[in-house]
Image: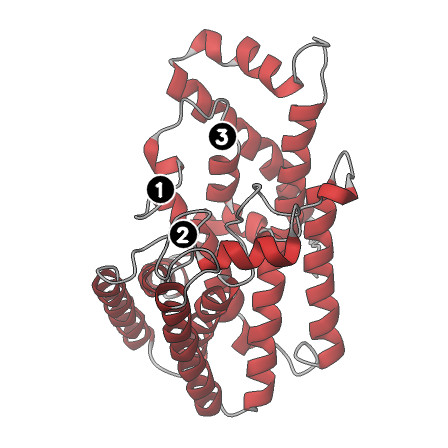
Amino acid sequence: MAAMVIVNNPGDWDTVYWPLLHADWHGWTPTDLIFPFFLFIVGAVMPFGSAEGRAWPRVLRRTAIIIGVGWLLAAFPLFHVTTLRIPGVLPRIGLCYFAAATLVRLAGPDPRGIALAASSTSAILLVAYWILMTFVPVPGGHAGDLSEAGNLGAWLDRTLMGGHLWRKDWDPEGLLSTLPAIATTLLGVLAGLAVRDDASPRALVRRLSLWGLAGVLAGLACNLAFPINKSLWTSSYVLFTAGVASAVLAACYAWVDASPSPATRHWSEPFVALGRNALLLFVASGVLAKILIYWKWPDPHRPLGSWLYAVAFVRYAPPKIASLLFALTHLLLLWAGLWWLHRRKWYWTA
């Protein structure tokens, strides 16, 4: 959550350190790990849910809230329904959550059944997506076109959603690429099952680390035929990022959960305040960013964010450092509010 706020709110998009930017197209940067980590976590927590949380009314309610909040955030502050972006980060999270929760529910209470369903469905989705994107020709185009506007997913989004996309001719959170994103969530379910297992902390860290290494190597191998690409959410990207997520989970578990030191848990508490109110942080960050863009004050000819950046940051630091400090200030302000809520145990959950 902290990384998301930092990469989404630089002072100036033209002066940003490269790790805080997405890859131009094929390839990856640390920023390209953030969204798949979100979905991986969504899946990882599912095995810990109660039977009440897996009930159909609760699943449908949570899905509707996540998608609905995403659309409200996309519409804010102008609320131009005719150009409202239908895909988006929260809508994708909502769809992936619904698909994974449905599969977990249908697979029954047996962890082995859930693991088999999650692993087999992930494999099917990744192979099917690779076949569709590389062998099915786009009407008026050709098979295997992985450009922004020329790929099969972009054509499908234009056909079904017209002008309700991030850009005129494509969207990075389109419908077709949601299929492999579901696989990312299901791989998270497998990790969650491992954490819930009775294995010793050392065995769990070893298992997650090996899974991480296997995922990274598999992703790099698949990259030769189907390039790692966040915007297309390619199958190689799913394997690679799930591998990194598993390795990071192993490191966090070894450092925090399996650590006998109370100081380690105390050090991690500020991040808990962000994670426990993740939905609120996402919305608050988006609203604050748009206020800084659309509110022209005190200069009626300049957005508030631009004015603050020029007055309080650019004057006192080199361009890239000033841009990063602006993002960190954004995070600090949001964290202060969430820390206050965390101390009072006030959380907003879907």
**Hey, what amino acid is under mark 2?**
Lys
Q: Residues within 10 Å of mark 3 (few under 14, many from 20)?
A: many
Q: Please, is residue 190 above or below residue 279 in the view? A: below
* Residue 16 coordinates in the image, percent (x, y): 39, 27
Q: State the SS at label 3.
A: helix
Q: Please, is residue 28 above or below residue 190 in the view? A: above
Q: State the SS at label 1.
A: loop
Question: In front: 276, or 264?
Answer: 276
* Residue 48 coordinates in the image, percent (x, y): 55, 76
| In the image: residue 211, left or right of residue 292 | left
Q: State the SS at label 2.
A: loop
Provide the residue designation for mark 3: 328
Distance CA(mark 3)–CA(mark 1): 22 Å
Which mark sits nearer the N-terminus, 3 or 1? 1
Provide the residue designation for mark 1: 23
Q: Residues within 10 Å of mark 1 (few under 14, many from 20)?
A: some
In this view of the protein, can residue 277 be seen by the observer? Answer: no
Question: In front: 202, or 263?
Answer: 202
Question: In front: 114, or 275?
Answer: 114
Determine the residue positioned at 36% across, 74% down. 127
Distance CA(mark 3)–CA(mark 2): 24 Å
For marks 3 and 2, give the one nearer the viewer.
2
In this view of the protein, can residue 17 be seen by the observer? Answer: yes
Q: Which mark is residue 230?
A: 2
Determine the residue positioned at 56% across, 9% down. 311
**Hey, what amino acid is under mark 3?**
Leu
- The answer to the question of whether label 2 and label 1 lie on touching residues, with beta carbons closer than 8 A, is yes
Q: Quadrant of the C terminus?
A: bottom right
Determine the residue positioned at 47% across, 53% down. 35
Q: Which mark is residue 154?
A: none
